[in-house]
Image: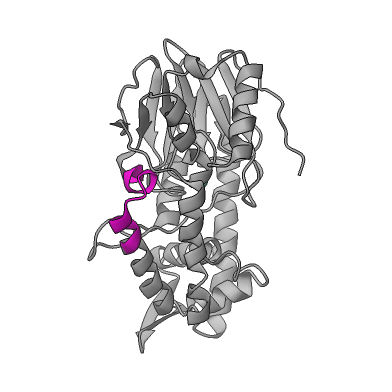
Amino acid sequence: MQIDTSISTTVAGIHKLVIPTPFAVGPVNVYIVEGEAVTLFDVGPKTEEAWDSFTSQLKQVGFSLNDIDQVILTHHHVDHCGLLDILLEKRDIPVFGHPLGVPWVEQNDEFLRWHRNYFTEFYLKMGVEKGLLADTDRYYQMLDRLSCRVRLSNTLREGDQIPGMEGWKVYETPGHAQSHLVFHRESDGVLLGGDHIIKHISSNAILESPLRRGEERPKTLLQYRESLLRCKHLDVTIVFSGHGDEVHDMQALIDRRIQEQEVRAQKIRGWLVHEPLTPYQICQRMFPGVYQKELALTMSEVIGYLDLLIEQDRITEEQSGGLFRYKAL
Ligand SMILES: [Zn+2]
């Protein structure tokens, strides 16, 4: 894959570094933002290749490791935070992120065990074949290899002030990740959008377990849509995203994403008119050839559309023998 290492000069004081990842999504964008403090937004996955790429691009944009005052995470996914393990070995600097990202960036063993058990149980109820569940082990092994084990020095919530970043506002945008934040500079309409808004692909509203036993799981696609609509009201001239190119027409892109979700949900509902199906059966039909390899992502898509259709009173859920099936209303 050709990696675009061109450095963005569209907005003075914001430098885009394009860091390779071993994931299908391709490279991740991280940003150096100059202000009173020099802030690094996201870092990349924990690979040698990512580190080499990061340090050489940092030099190209005129900075050294010693210039970075602080790191802010848009969300806890490994392609955005893993490299913290290496960076913090060289530089002891504060790291900010949403409190819901804490157990992930720490790789809190108890939390990960709970997450894993929750999904084993959940997927079986959704009709997933037992044989496929063993593959989710690979996911936790990947976390161990490519993610970090660090403590956030500061947590950030909506409305908090970031030291050294006067004029920037923090917004909570759960959906793609429960810990997702975006950062808006009102004076010129710059939005650091993380994976909330991406130009070339629709962002997956990835399922996460509830924080504690007995709580309801977050309805991630519904959250994602609400977060998109909230951003639509911000005055945004350019979005610097976690992957791919900058977005100049955010409002139109948000409308398109909302529309695409409706179309896909409608397609699923069409199937459910003929027969009740489990989420897994829908997943197999919707993503043939992909679902085995990308079980979590494809099941997240399907369950998201089912949550949406239920909320719109267009389908209903039935339960028998521990299995969930859905049918059209
Ligand atoms: Zn992500």
Q: What residue is shown at x 44% (from left), y 62% (from top)? A: 308
Residue 159 quadrant:
top left
- Could you say which is closer to the camera, residue 248 or residue 151? 151
Position above or below: 16 against 152:
above
Is residue 13 visible in the rendered image? The answer is yes
The quarter of the picture where the N terminus appears is top right
What colouring does the structure picture have?
one colour
Position above or below: 272 against 4:
below
Q: Position of residue 242 (x, y in %)?
A: 56, 37
**Which range is magenta?**
100-113
Q: What residue is shown at x 57% (from left), y 48% (from top)? A: 257
Q: Please tell me whether residue 101 belongs to the stretch shown in magenta.
A: yes
Farthest residue, direction right: 2
Q: Please tell me whether residue 46 belongs to the stretch shown in magenta.
A: no
Farthest residue, direction top: 36
Is residue 248 visible in the rendered image? The answer is no
Farthest residue, direction left: 214
Position above or below: 51 against 294:
above
Chief secondary structure of the magenta span? helix
Q: What residue is shown at x 47% (from left), y 18% (from top)? A: 68
Left or right: residue 206 compared with residue 107: right
